[in-house]
Image: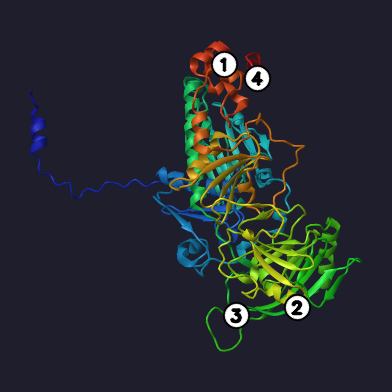
Amino acid sequence: VVFKKSTFKGLQSKADYSAVKLKKVERKCLHPEIMLIRIKGEKNVDVRLVAPIYTSLHSYASFVLVTHSRIFLYHGNYSNLLERTKAILFATNICNKNGMLSCFAKTVENVNNDSENSDFWLLLGNENQNSPLLFNDIPRELLMICEPFEKFIAKLNVVYRVFDDLTILTAMSSNIPNRKLFSDSNVLIFDFGSEIYVWIGSNRSQGLPFVCDSKMLFGTVFDEKRPEWCLLLKINQGVIDLLFESKFHDREILKDVSPRKQQIQSSQNKRSNSINNDENLAYQLGRFLANNRQVESAYVLEDIEICRSANNVFTEQLTYFVLDDDYDLREIDSLWLFKMDTCYVIKWNYRVERAERIEHETGRPRTAFFYWLGSKTTKKQQGLCAMALRNLDKERHPHERIMQGQEPFIFLQLFDGNMVVAGEDSGIFYMHGSSISSECYLVELQNEVILRSHAIYIIVNSEVTIWYGAALKFANKIVNGGHPYFKLLKNSAKIEEIVECDEKVDLPVIKADNWTNVSFKLLNLDTMIVDQGSRLWLWNDSVVSTFSLLVAKAFWENRSGQMTVIYKNHEPTSFKALFPQWCDFDEQHPSKNLDGNSDAIEVNELLRNRAQFWPLEKVIARDLPNGLDFSNLEKYLDDDDFQLAFKMNRNCFYSLPVWKQIEMRKKNKLF
């Protein structure tokens, strides 16, 4: 190798370059310094930028607060499962993609209603550095909306198209945008109220470089038209912005809308990717349900949170009213017996003292009205009761509507365990227990009563019989424990206590397996997870989906006990025993697509059966294990039998129109 003389001179140079300072590259921030993103909806969840102040928060949605270095996640007390799941995935995606939304945070900080997250409240302008109480309420106008929230808020959406001569026409308005708007040659302006995006197709990037000028778009500077926290962003085709993508529920195509590249990916890869995504989503949803147990929330009256075990709330006076036949509220001396066809009003005068101990009384006098509506009252009675209460309360105190069967703890505690609900003429009362004795109450059951082995019943006729189930784990008897209700009965009737094994009551008894507390998780309108503690039930209105099976399996991970799939109108007695009373569903609307496969089956066994292939003869004859999906029988054929039956492979079959697939299934006796 031969080196030039200049090379040797360069290597021998002793010049000092330490004084030379390189210019630091400054990154231009495209997003506001603080962004508060609301996530709310029932089906197609709406993700939208809102004002970054604490008064934007409320209990009926999830929120993500994004700064350049931190991400906070807040769930409202009444936010639904989809909103919480969407918020978690949204915040996690920001962390996983460094610099997304101009944020470089590596972890998500969860915010609770306590003072541990003071930075969250400071960023939103709450100088008290703790959770305010005012956002527990939501504007009444919003609660009165009949349509889903995402459809209501979509009325703000407008999409404009910019043509070659710079004319701007409306391409879509008052709807959720979809991918059909995109084209390589289009320039689109998406106006979501608090967010404005200018999307430029790959064939137009050089043609309209100035289209993102706010003065050209709106006739003036952007911040004079909308608040500073709003977002104006230019997006070229192929550039990913998570907040923009969340506006589209088929957003994966936004990464590349070129038809040429869409054709490259085979239908087989699409199918396998879809299966993997469903499995991952099912696992995440199952673990989310398992790890986010429902926490009992406090009851809010006049911006004051009242907990079940609060010892600083004192009742000053109780006044009772009943709605009479003339639909007027008539005051009565006492109230402990509630009739199911009657409306009642309770006026509660109370006082809330400070948490710390002091020598004298504190807290101003407060008043609240509860109006209780029996299950057999008509809509007319309920409306007239509310109107009569409005006329009675001239000072406009809080009015709390209480439906029978949905009584909150604060209402039950007012009666100190004396509350009895009657109106079925069976004379058999079920005792609703509680860890706090003042919340216990009795409800009369409908005729044809079936007793539960883990429950307590009061049978009232000429005598009063207290029936204890054999599986009951209470150590003390009710009467000896001084239950308030029986203080009223001791002087007027003979009271006898018996247990299940005495067999003195001629009524059927059913028993739940290993009775413990039960919790419910609704997956969709026809599937429910019932967690019995020692056992899991997966209840379904029709054929259970594989997605629901995977969610249930993930929910039960690292726990022992059976996981059983059951179907509507075919529930076993051990499941019915979990409920105080069970009424079978209307037989006029039987479960769909069961085809006789309605027997209970274990979740893992059903998953194994669905993953297997079965001979063509057995599939045609429906000689298959219980729980398989008979509406898609071709899934249980191996590749050879599939080719033999349909004269094509699976990819070709599933690329056909749905009507053609159904026609071919019928032809091969697989429908």
| Structural distance between the alpha carbons of marks 1 and 3 | 76 Å
Q: SS for tag 4?
A: helix
The reply to whether discs 1 and 2 touch (Cβ–Cβ < 8 Å) is no
Q: SS for tag 1?
A: helix
- The image quadrant that residue 51 belongs to is bottom right
**Which mark, residue 662?**
4
Q: Is residue 196 left or right of residue 291?
A: right
Crowdedness near tag 3: few (<14), some (14–19) or many (≥20) residues, C-alpha within 10 Å: some
Between 249 and 630, the one lying in front of the other is 630
Q: Earlier in the sequence, mark 4 or mark 1?
A: 1
Q: Looking at this view, name the residue that lies furthest to the bottom.
A: 359
Q: Is residue 112 above or below residue 302?
A: above
Q: Is residue 46 above or below residue 327?
A: above
**Which mark, residue 617?**
1
Crowdedness near tag 1: few (<14), some (14–19) or many (≥20) residues, C-alpha within 10 Å: few
Q: Amino acid at mark 2?
A: Asn
Rendered residue at 53%/83% (across/down): 357
Q: Which residue is mark 2?
A: 491
| Structural distance between the alpha carbons of marks 1 and 2 | 74 Å
Q: Amino acid at mark 1?
A: Glu
Q: Amino acid at mark 3?
A: Glu
Instruction: Judge depth for marks 3 and 4 and give the one in front.
Output: 4
Instruction: Judge depth for marks 2 and 3 and give the one in front.
Output: 2
Q: Amino acid at mark 4?
A: Ile
Q: SS for tag 3?
A: loop
- The image quadrant that residue 181 belongs to is top right
- The image quadrant that residue 424 belongs to is bottom right
**Is the C terminus in the top left, top right, bottom left or bottom right quadrant?**
top right
Residue 622 position within the rendered picture, expressed as x and y whole percent measured from the top left: 61, 22
Q: Which residue is mark 3?
A: 353
Instruction: Judge depth for marks 1 and 3 and give the one in front.
Output: 1
| Structural distance between the alpha carbons of marks 2 and 4 | 72 Å
